[in-house]
């Protein structure tokens, strides 16, 4: 297990309507996660700020990403199109062996590519997060975009993703971003960005070393 850790702050119930959260200052109380890296790319990456909070019903998350040239593949609404778009990602695993783990990849529309996975990139793309248990929204401005979401704690518990130990509640999770740019020949090239450096020679998020720990404030 990587030693990378983040503390998820606790908030009072009553503000779980994601559509209204921008009207509050609740995100001001959240810890910032900003130490994202792209170990396989020599170019500096633009700032990314991730925040998370929770109450008795939901886990909330927020990405704010500096980007003045967002690329979105709009040929259709398939998971394949989302996979070819600029997006943010959360992978949450049930155990250290990643048997299974669950992937949420969200673009700026916002569209969700959600799937269940096993080691060695064994993906079940037909799987979807339980209906009604996740909600996302997004906004794209001149120089940045935001993706916010909430996931019910009920669904996280049902999938065995919320754990307990002597220190309290935690999740084993990876936080990522995929950014597409065009090279001099006009070919689309991906930059892979991660919170936790998996120490691999090539970009790889689907391994245990790319996960860290979210500790839930008591």
Image (cartoon, grey):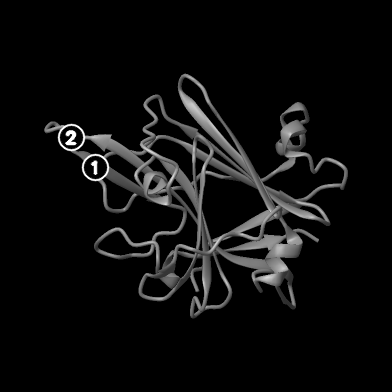
Q: Residues within 10 Å of mark 1 (few under 14, many from 20)?
A: few
Q: Which residue is rendered at x = 43% and y = 64% of the image?
A: 210
The answer to whether the residue labelled 1 contacts the one labelled 2, judged by CB atoms less than 8 Å apart, is: yes
Relative to the observer, which residue lies in front, 110 or 185? 110
Please give left or right for residue 58 compared with residue 131 in the image: right
Q: Which residue is rendered at x = 70% and y = 55% of the image?
A: 133
Question: Does residue 19 appear in the picture of this structure?
Answer: yes
Which quarter of the rendering shows the C terminus?
A: bottom right
Residue 183 horizontal/vertical position (percent): 18, 34
Residue 19 horizontal/vertical position (percent): 72, 33
Please give left or right for residue 3 compared with residue 164 in the image: left
Q: Secondary structure at mark 2?
A: loop
Please give left or right for residue 148 compared with residue 110 in the image: right
The single residue placed furthest to the top in the displayed view is 142
The single residue placed furthest to the left in the displayed view is 185
The single residue placed furthest to the front in the displayed view is 76
Question: What number is the disc on residue 69?
Answer: none
The residue singled out by tag 2 in the image is: 183
Relative to the observer, which residue lies in front, 217 or 18? 18
From the viewer's perspective, is residue 163 above or below residue 33?
A: below
Q: Secondary structure at mark 1?
A: strand
Question: Does residue 174 appear in the picture of this structure?
Answer: no
Q: Which residue is rendered at x = 72% and y = 69% of the image?
A: 157
The residue singled out by tag 1 in the image is: 189
Q: Quadrant of residue 128?
A: bottom right
Mark sitting earlier along the chain (1/2): 2
Q: Residues within 10 Å of mark 2 (few under 14, many from 20)?
A: few
Q: CA distance from mark 1 to mark 2?
A: 7 Å
From the viewer's perspective, is residue 96 above or below residue 2?
A: below
Please give left or right for residue 9 compared with residue 106 in the image: right
């Amino acid at each position: 297990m990587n030693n990378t850790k983040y503390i998820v702050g606790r908030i009072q119930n009553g503000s779980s309507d994601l559509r209204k959260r921008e009207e509050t200052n609740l995100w001001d109380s959240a810890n910032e996660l900003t130490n994202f890296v792209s170990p396989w790319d020599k170019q500096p990456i633009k700032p990314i700020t991730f925040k998370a909070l929770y109450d008795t019903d939901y886990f909330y998350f927020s990405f704010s990403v500096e980007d003045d040239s967002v690329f979105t593949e709009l040929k259709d609404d398939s998971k394949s199109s989302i996979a070819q778009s600029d997006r943010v990602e959360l992978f949450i695993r049930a155990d250290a062996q990643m048997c299974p783990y669950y992937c949420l990849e969200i673009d700026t529309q916002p569209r969700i590519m959600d799937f269940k996975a096993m080691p060695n990139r064994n993906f079940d793309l037909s799987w979807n997060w339980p209906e009604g248990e996740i909600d996302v929204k997004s906004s794209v401005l001149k120089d940045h975009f935001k993706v916010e979401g909430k996931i019910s704690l009920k669904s996280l518990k049902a999938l065995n993703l919320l754990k307990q130990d002597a220190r309290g509640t935690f999740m084993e999770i990876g936080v990522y971003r995929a950014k597409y740019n065009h090279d001099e020949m006009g070919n689309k090239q991906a930059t892979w960005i991660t919170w936790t450096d998996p120490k691999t020679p090539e970009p790889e998020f689907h391994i245990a070393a790319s996960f860290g720990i979210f500790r839930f404030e008591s």
